[in-house]
Amino acid sequence: MVSLAPVYADEGYIPFFPDFLEPIGIKYRVGIYERVTRVYLPNSTHPSKEIMSSSSSTKIKHLGYSYLPPIWFTLPETLMGPASFRGGLLDIHFPKEVKDLLPNYGPGGVNQPYVRQMDIKRKSLYNDFFNDSDRAFADANPKWALSADVTSSRIFLGYYWGVFIPIGDYHRFIKFGAGLGVYNIDLSFKLNLCSQFISTGTEGGCIGKKEIDSYSGKKLGITLARHMTLWERRTKDSIWRFFKVSEGLALGSNDKGLILVKLKNHSKNLALWMSSLTIEMVSYTYRF
């Protein structure tokens, strides 16, 4: 006898949805995240080539980390052996604008009343990147700096494999995992010249801002997914985690893995390093 009943390959509780993306519980967490954006000048002769960033190391308060939403969901993990696992990464950041990226400053940094790119990078920008209008602005403002306003939404979807140190039936210490996936970044980028970039205490920003170029579009590509948890206690009803760090890194098309951005008013491209860094200090998951 031959059965004509339909056969369904999907066995999860969400029809036609990958099992590794089906949440297994609701998570309550305390932590921070950062949308990392670093801007490079690919044609610069300086070795580092970085000209500005949304640096979390600065004391300027509008840059750096933000608090995580306190309620999220937990994706499943599958044991592959007594000390190995695999699982998914889904990191979603809704549209947000970050104004006045910090110039890659020289000696003294944000302890000075103003910051600007290092002299060797200023020379490269002036000679190799600026057009006539930019040079006229720079000549009239000797403390000029180059900055940018960035608005982006970011989705990182990945799958990783890893190892941990098992202690008893429930405890997992020092979990590490890495893998690959895809990203989707909706990006709006405004490049600005500042008459000076002020840094006083926790305040700072682009003074005398002049927009000189822009970019708007979507970026799709391969992402590198990374994960680390210091300690996890996992039972059939709940999951406790202490100090979990996860990152999705957008891999670009140039030889350094950076995302190329073609500007409207300048003949040379910029290159971006874009990632999503999430740090959960403590979290509790109630499993379904």
Image (spheres, rainbow, N blue to C red):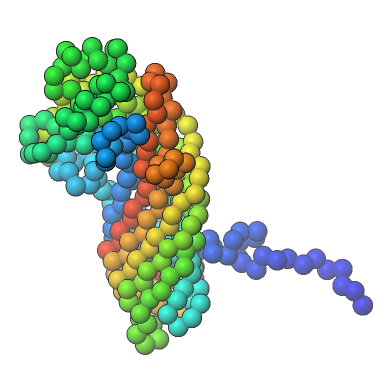
Return the residue nearer the eye: 249 or 184: 249
Q: Nearer the viewer, residue 25 or 112?
A: 112
Work out whether 172 lies above or below 50. below
Quarter of image, res 204? top left
Where 196 sits versus 56, above or below? Answer: above
In this view, 137 is above or below 185: above
**Residue at image location 49% in from the left, 77% down from the top:** 79
Q: Is residue 174 left or right of residue 207?
A: right
Q: Quadrant of residue 244?
A: bottom left
Q: Is residue 88 toward the left or the right of residue 111 in the image?
A: right
- Image height of 117 relative to 47, above or below: above
In the rendered image, residue 281, in percent from the top left (x then y), is placed at: 27, 63
Camera-nearest residue between 62 and 157:
157
Give x and y (percent) for residue 245: 32, 61
Q: Identify the residue shown where x is 87% and y is 68%.
A: 4
Q: Residue at x 33, y 55 (%)?
A: 278
All told, the count of numbered labels is 0
| Res. 98 in view | no
Image quarter of the N terminus: bottom right
Where residue 241 sits in the image (x, y, percent)?
33, 70
Q: Residue furthest right?
A: 1
Residue 196 x/y as whole percent:
15, 24
| Res 64 visible | yes
Who's the residue at 38% across and 76% down the image?
164
Instruction: Find the residue positioned furthest to the bottom.
Output: 168
